[in-house]
Image (tube, grey):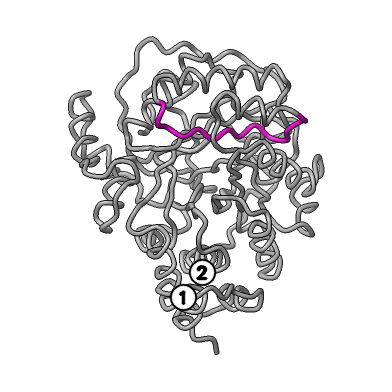
Amino acid sequence: MIDFSTLGQRILAGQPATRDEALAVLTASDAQTFAIVDAASQLRRHFFGNKIKVNYLVNLKSGLCPEDCSYCSQRLGSEADILKYTWIKQDEAIKQAQYGIAGGASRVCMVASGKGPTDRDVERVSKMVEGLKDENPHIEVCACMGILKDGQAQRLKDAGVDAYNHNLNTSEDHYKDICTTHSFEDRVNTVHKAQDAGLSACSGLIVGMGESDEQLVDAIFSLKNLEGDSIPVNFLMPFDGTPLAGTWELTPMRCLRILAAVRLVAPEKELRMAGGREMHLRSLQPLALHVVNSLFLGDYLTSEGQSALEDLTMIRDGGFEVLGAEGRDLVAEHQEFVKAHGVNLAEETGAGSTPCGSAPGSGCGGCGSAGACGPEPAATPTVTPVEIGIAEADASAGVVLRKRGVGTQTAPNA
């Protein structure tokens, strides 16, 4: 039996975890999980101290994607009742990003659906980024637009984009089981194009899609070999109207082991608990902060997350600080903001509604943008205060679809 404490100390001393050790972490018992979390926590503290990086998603273009990724609510043929809209305007993109920045985000992730961008799409997003950076030069921007063509990564870099997200999602030999309209190799090549242009690579996983433990180990080591800078781990949201509807393979303890396995294999990388954390980690989210050092604030691309206030309170109560907001009381700032805008704080934290965990997300790293389609979103001249607590989940799926924020006339969860 592996002594996980000794494993953590050995990795800290510079001896990497092996594939067999990663597999042992994934297959460990629930009783062993807290020793695994402790070992992973040593590495997290060594490389990142008590800091949490807060990221914020802006969905620039939603739905109507021509790809057939089986996990995705925006896929070809999806019957999920998500928001569908074509490109939002530059001013709207910047306004939406400002919500997350005010909430403590140091990175804004600008995402658009589709297989990959046209040059016109890249130019459109480049102008958005230039405008955002003019007003917020200290903010990092990560773009997520799908499979890139030659020269597109460089244009994004020139506009001020700092990072590019394109998830591998799963292992190479499992990829054909979740998508047939592009390949695992296409995704790897896009990550390399981003890196060649000097962009920081963000590439991660979606777990709970029928992969074996061995395939998950393969995927984790593929990400390590990519030499990216951040690894988001998404937990499958089984949206109604998609091929993986009704797929439930994860428990909170298994989710902890998956996060710990990634930390032990790639100890120095930014590790983000991303979409689906509320549903699958549930009450163990605060414990997961001792393994990860990054999260998304508020809602996701097409689904709701727990309230921003709950996220910020969870970070504070765990003894962590938001990176870039040291010395600020973000919880108090948020409370003052929602009070000033007429939001009931008891409702905003979900009191009297479904428990934390019934509202999932989809995570950064879906697709990209292949061109404008669908109706233009309604203009949002007036932002209506919103009760930011989690709505009741659909009884059969447990996925709460996003109906606020960008693409609506309702204030976002930030």
Q: Which mark is on residue 36?
A: 1
Comparing labels 1 and 2, the label whose residue is closer to the camera = 1
Q: Secondary structure at mark 2?
A: helix
Name which quarter of the figure residue 34 lies in.
bottom left
- Determine whether 216 is above or below 399 in the image: below
The percent position of residue 147, horizontal first and vertical second, equals: 73, 35
What span is colored magenta in the figure?
A: 137-150
Name which quarter of the figure residue 95 lies in.
top left
Which residue type does callout 1 highlight?
Ile
Q: Are marks 1 and 2 in contact (CB under 8 Å)?
A: yes
- For this view, does 319 lie left or right of residue 396? left
User: Magenta segment: does it hold 141?
Assistant: yes
> Which one is nearer the viewer's eye here, 381 or 140?
140
Residue under the point 74% across and 28% down: 151
* Secondary structure mostly taken by the magenta-highlighted segment of the chain: loop
Of labels 1 and 2, earlier in sequence is 1
- For this view, does 270 lie left or right of residue 192? left
The percent position of residue 396, horizontal first and vertical second, equals: 54, 48
Residue under the point 27% across and 37% down: 348
Residue under the point 45% across and 22% down: 132
Mark 1 Cα shell of 10 Å, populated few (<14), some (14-19), many (≥20):
many
Which residue type does callout 2 highlight?
Arg
The percent position of residue 93, horizontal first and vertical second, equals: 48, 20
The quarter of the image holding the N terminus is bottom right
- Determine whether 172 is above or below 159 in the image: below
- For this view, does 31 lie left or right of residue 234? left
Q: Which mark is on residue 257?
A: 2
Q: Secondary structure at mark 1?
A: helix
The percent position of residue 194, horizontal first and vertical second, equals: 67, 38
Q: Which mark is on residue 287?
A: none
